[in-house]
């Protein structure tokens, strides 16, 4: 689940092999927005330095700075 409380955001879903990445970009270049992301234990957060950590290590609601992005990763479901 991704929620921005109505704030403008660009959401992109990318697949790479066994993983799906969700990139959320704050479209407002002047003000931060509140971003809520929730998922199960397979949801990971990709940090700015490329480190991948469990998303559960962070609060589900975070502040996304003006123009900034946040990246999340989870296993691609098999079809």
Image (cartoon, rainbow, N blue to C red):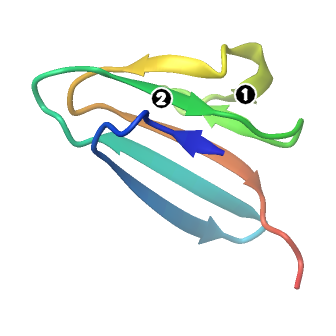
Report which residue position mark 1 lands on. Answer: 55
- Decide if residue 63 is on the left or right side of residue 61: left
State whether residue 6 is above or below residue 59: below
> Picture quarter containing residue 39?
top right
x 67%, y 61%: residue: 20
Report which residue position mark 2 lands on. Answer: 35
Find the distance from the CA under tag 1 to the CA under tag 2: 13 Å
> Picture quarter containing residue 32?
top left
Residue 48 visible somewhere in the drawing: no
> Picture quarter containing residue 16?
bottom right
Direction front: furthest residue = 6
Mark 1 or 2, closer to the camera: 2
**The N terminus lies in which quarter of the figure?**
top right
| SS at mark 2 in the image | strand
Mark 1–mark 2 CB contact (< 8 Å)? no
**The C terminus lies in which quarter of the figure?**
bottom right
How many residues crowd around disc 2 within 10 Å: few (fewer than 14), some, or many (20 or more)?
Answer: many
State whether residue 63 is above or below residue 24: above
Q: Nearer the viewer, residue 23 or 10?
A: 10
Q: How many marks?
A: 2
How many residues crowd around disc 1 within 10 Å: few (fewer than 14), some, or many (20 or more)?
Answer: many
x 76%, y 15%: residue: 57
Q: Nearer the viewer, residue 57 or 38?
A: 38
Residue 8 visible somewhere in the drawing: yes
Q: Position of residue 48 (x, y in %)?
A: 46, 27
| SS at mark 1 in the image | helix
Q: Position of residue 45 (x, y in %)?
A: 64, 33
Q: Position of residue 71 (x, y in %)?
A: 52, 41
Q: Position of residue 18 (x, y in %)?
A: 79, 66
């Amino acid at each position: 689940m991704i929620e921005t409380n109505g704030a403008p955001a660009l959401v992109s879903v990318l697949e790479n092999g066994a993983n799906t990445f969700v990139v959320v970009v704050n479209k407002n270049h002047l003000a931060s927005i509140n971003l809520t992301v929730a998922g199960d234990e397979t949801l990971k957060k990709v940090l700015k330095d490329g480190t991948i950590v469990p998303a559960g290590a962070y609060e589900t609601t975070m502040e996304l700075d003006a123009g900034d992005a946040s990246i999340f990763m989870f296993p691609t479901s098999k079809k």
